[in-house]
Image (cartoon, rainbow, N blue to C red):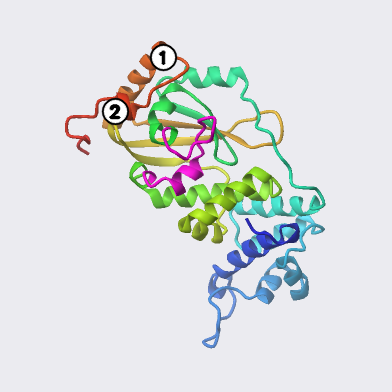
Amino acid sequence: MDQQPGNRGEIRGFLAGRRARITPAQAGLPTSARRRVAGLRREEVAVLAGVSTEWYTRLEKGHIGGVSEDVLDAVARALRLDDDERTYLFDLARSARRESRAPSRRGDVEVPPRVQWLLDSMTMSSAFVRNGRTDIVAGNPLARALLAPMFDSATVDRHGRPNIARYVFLDPGAQDFFVDWGAAGAATAALLRAEAGREPRDRALRALVGELSTLSPEFRSRWAAHDVLMRHDGVKRLQHPAVGRLDLTFQSLGLPLPGRAVHNLVVYTAEPGSASEDRLTLLDSWAATQSRTARPSRPSPQRKLTPWASGRPSE
């Protein structure tokens, strides 16, 4: 994570990156053949936002704590920020106002029993809860079966809890498990970047980003892009070691829990009547059996499920 005082490096990198991606033509500004940069200059952003060049330059250098919401909104419009990016900019401003606070050691929020009951009731969907650092803090048996490579990875913590980012970037097997590994990496880094805007002084988050930056060139590249994602949903394609290819839709929903920490309920489902539904049903059957006979320990499908005869089902 950027180590500038008061998180100024984070602010500078984000605003400069958003400015660089907008061409003068896109902003409705005149262009010149002698132009040295493809993106907007600081003075052009200042004109679009209705502020002075000196003021915007100061803002881009990280002096954002005392800026009003109206001015931030004008900058967001000038830089054509999407909803997640705009929220991130406002999070950075709020964090700057609290910059005198020491780094925090946020304790993990215990998942209430009612949430676990909810997860366990979703028998035809893989459902789990992740926090802003992408730790999987609770899940149903089908989530454990579906994400078996992640749960069985050497990247789990000492309590056996998976971290999605650590698995994606540090376990070579992730490139086989995620069919669209590049997209998974981009989304995961962007989720962590959003969390860094909300909680820049979270020591556990800083440690995670530092670890990933040190060990993964791919993560360093993604992190430097300053892309932001608040909520992630869509289609996930997995190559499961036991049942083969799974094309699943997934939805991420905000889950209110005690404290300010962000948690999301993530649900994976298959299209009715599809081959992926059949394979997910197979995993569900195994997971239900293991849940009845082997609580609380659940062997990995990698070791216990018998793969299809061909090794991977036909597409």
Residue 299: image location, x then y, percent: 38, 23
Q: Which mark is residue 267?
A: none
For the point 70% across and 37% down, the residue is 106
Q: Secondary structure at mark 2?
A: helix
Q: Which residues are magenta?
A: 152-174
Image quarter of residue 60: bottom right
- Looking at the image, is mark 1 or mark 2 nearer the viewer? 1
For the point 79% across and 57% down, the residue is 65
For the point 17% across and 34% down, the residue is 310
For the point 28% across and 26% down, the residue is 278
Query: In the rendered view of the protein, which quadrant contains the N terminus?
Result: bottom right
Image quarter of residue 244: top left
Residue 27: image location, x then y, percent: 58, 70
The residue pinned by badge 1 equals: 294
Type of the residue with mark 1 = Ala
Residue 213: image location, x then y, percent: 54, 55
| Nearer the observer, 32 or 253 | 253
Farthest bottom residue in view: 34
Q: Which is more N-terminal, label 2 or label 1?
A: 2
Q: Which mark is residue 279?
A: 2
Farthest top residue in view: 293
Task: Measure the alpha-carbon separation of dots 1 and 2.
Answer: 22 Å
Farthest left residue in view: 310
| Nearer the observer, 198 or 138 | 138
Query: In the rendered view of the protein, which quadrant contains the C terminus?
Result: top left
Residue 32: image location, x then y, percent: 55, 85
Above or below, 232 relative to 100: above
Is 170 magenta? The answer is yes
Type of the residue with mark 2 = Arg
